[in-house]
Amino acid sequence: MARIVMKFGGTSVGDVDRIKNVARRVKAEVDAGNEVAVVVSAMSGETNKLVAYCREIAPLHDAREYDAVVATGEQVTIGLLALALQEIGVNARSWMGWQIPIRTDGAHSKARITEIETDDLIRRMQDGQVAVVAGFQGIGPDNRVTTLGRGGSDTSAVALAAALKADICDIYTDVDGVYTTDPRIVAKARKLDKITYEEMLESASLGAKVLQVRSVEMAMKHGVRVQVRSSFSDAPGTIICDEEEIVEQELVSGIAYSRDEAKITLVKVADRPGVAAAIFGPLTAANINVDMIVQNVSHGGGATDMTFTVSKGDLDRAVKVLAEKKGELGYEDLWADANVVKVSVIGVGMRSHAGVAQTMFQALSAKGINIQVISTSEIKVSVLIAEEYTELAVRALHTAYGMDAA
Amino acid sequence: MARIVMKFGGTSVGDVDRIKNVARRVKAEVDAGNEVAVVVSAMSGETNKLVAYCREIAPLHDAREYDAVVATGEQVTIGLLALALQEIGVNARSWMGWQIPIRTDGAHSKARITEIETDDLIRRMQDGQVAVVAGFQGIGPDNRVTTLGRGGSDTSAVALAAALKADICDIYTDVDGVYTTDPRIVAKARKLDKITYEEMLESASLGAKVLQVRSVEMAMKHGVRVQVRSSFSDAPGTIICDEEEIVEQELVSGIAYSRDEAKITLVKVADRPGVAAAIFGPLTAANINVDMIVQNVSHGGGATDMTFTVSKGDLDRAVKVLAEKKGELGYEDLWADANVVKVSVIGVGMRSHAGVAQTMFQALSAKGINIQVISTSEIKVSVLIAEEYTELAVRALHTAYGMDAA
């Protein structure tokens, strides 16, 4: 017997038949003797419809009213799922955020969970009642409904699992787990049985869209074991857990890539103290995030080249901001390139093994792929290359690290 | 300056443009210096959609979960209307039933309001903030969302007006007031400036569908002045108020009719004590309401004829129930007739004036209309006639009581 939290996203509860299917999956866990809480999203399309109403009425809207409107999507799903469970003989009741309550801070439309009261829930779960909980929502200090921001239901599920001290938080989705890389690119990609929080966090921030970054951060902070698994099959998924739980740690757990990158090079910037702050200050002020940064060795004459990346959507604005500051920064030329991709090798194993980066550089070189920028952290190596080489690079790296399925 | 409650139904808030239109009407009241609370229904069609989801999942559903689902319709509208008000510079915020709170009993899906806490609302209204309140919903003793039953938003508005001690409760609808009779039948029907609670209550229970019966009962009980008026024009509507407020009381205020009637006659029932109980007991047990009842003078031999009406939808079941009891009741024959209509003349003035019924009988007789059953109360006379005479009878009575517009 275990205490589990099950989370189903909008696609899994997209219509009445799918809600009934979710009910059957929940029943199977109950029949197996488990204590179950279920967290659900709005039926797919509903949140977008509600957001569109708000935008149509008020382009710059009061986030408190926006939250009151969009939180209704999850409220519909919890009632319907509770009914579907009752219909197949499962004792169940619905819980809105304010009823539990799931307390959040007052940052409407992007609130953070501060506390979840669980005494009543646990007592009922021990009595065999399934708690059907609205994801994405909570209640703020002003007694008004808050929402956690898009994708917040993953965070709701992990936070609830932490508060309930659940044995596992099963995130049901339309993929059946976390893969060594994108299976659409690499046919031999393998599903991982387990992956560490740190690796998952790097994957999420590097563009793999399986889980919200915030939910992984929260799982790591509270030590919640999370399983990513398919809504449509019974196969085990991928468990995200502590490093200690993974007996045979692989050197590299995955290859991620992100096409949402653009590169800017400022040619012959004055090489003097404070120049980096002078460049990145105005970008930060314009709310533009800078990712990889490389400063080349000085040219003669006290000048240097500065290369960095921004997201593709920010490129035009970034170029405009820097052009306006040209006199002040004193650079000779500005090169912008949107045809780049960031490819990353991730693995906690590389902390204790040298040569991981070297394998990457050799594999890319063997395919004639030029590396434009390199950036590293404790558990990943990222390189920026021309976008046209994306698939070739990912496949080459997958093979080079011995990850191809047999 | 006055304190007013404005109520808008589903058609009035049916899309974004209509919600903006409602916001402009509310702004006009605010600009006139009034303290305003607005009660709204779900956007038209939404409640039906949500009810259909519930029925599809569970034909016999848990009313608590049903309430959680259907209450979302009003929650969407309050958020959107608050946004629309803010957008045109009006200070406004939304209130769900549980936030105020509007407390109800625990009869989910048909709850009754027991208490509304208004201190915070009144303070904010006095500070110039418009309270946008979800109709149709409240919170039960179990801390779960309740709904008041279909059409409950009228009741919410009147109850809120009573709790706020509002000067008036304006019910905005798609008609511009209460008429002397159905304008679709009588072209010369007149809009009434005022009508008493008692008359409105009779009209509502006799089939005029302007207001929910419960909301009129509540208005009468708490002395709330209610105005029925059009969402689409600025013309004054009809005020429902105490008899004392109506200076020139007319003898008859309206002619109502209801086609939802069916007549049953039991021929030659044994004329002995307890026979009425023996007939109507099984009908009550089958949840069939009986309306008009007439017992004719005895035939020879200790037998009598018993005639009564039920709603058309209950006719087949009533006949079945009575057929099963034929042996016990010992009647000779059962005649059923669904082609009947109940026409009623209503007016508090008839309390102090004789001859109102006589005018009715003469007017119908002059048109050759046969009266099948008569029933009277202090302020109304109802007759059952063949359905084909409906329009003829209503027009003749409207003329006979001098109600035709010039």
Image (cartoon, coloured by chain):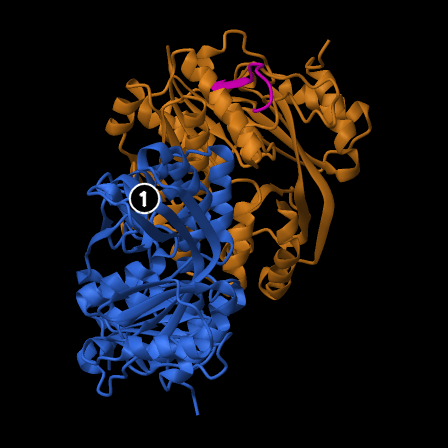
Chain colours: A blue, B orange
The answer to whether residue B283 of the structure is visible from this angle is no
Residue drawn at 78 percent across, 33 percent down: B389
Q: Quadrant of residue B244?
A: top left
Q: The disc numbered 1 marks a residue on which chain?
A: A
Q: Position of residue B306 (x, y in %)?
A: 63, 47
Residue drawn at 45 percent across, 49 percent down: A336
Judging depth in this view, the residue of B213 and A405 nearest the camera is A405
Q: Is residue A87 left or right of residue A34?
A: right
Judging depth in this view, the residue of B37 and B158 nearest the camera is B37
Judging depth in this view, the residue of B325 and B96 nearest the camera is B96
- Split into 4 quadrants, where in the image is the N terminus of chain A? bottom left
Q: Residue furthest bottom?
A: A406
Residues rendered magenta in the picture:
B231-240
Residue A2 in the magenta stretch? The answer is: no
Q: Which residue is mark 1?
A: A269
- Residue at disc 1, secondary structure: strand
Above/below status of B169 relative to B370: above
Q: Quadrant of residue A201?
A: bottom left
The answer to whether residue B73 of the structure is visible from this angle is yes
Q: Position of residue A84 (x, y in %)?
A: 45, 67
- Split into 4 quadrants, where in the image is the C terminus of chain A? bottom left
Above/below status of A342 relative to B27: below
Q: Amino acid at mark 1?
A: Val
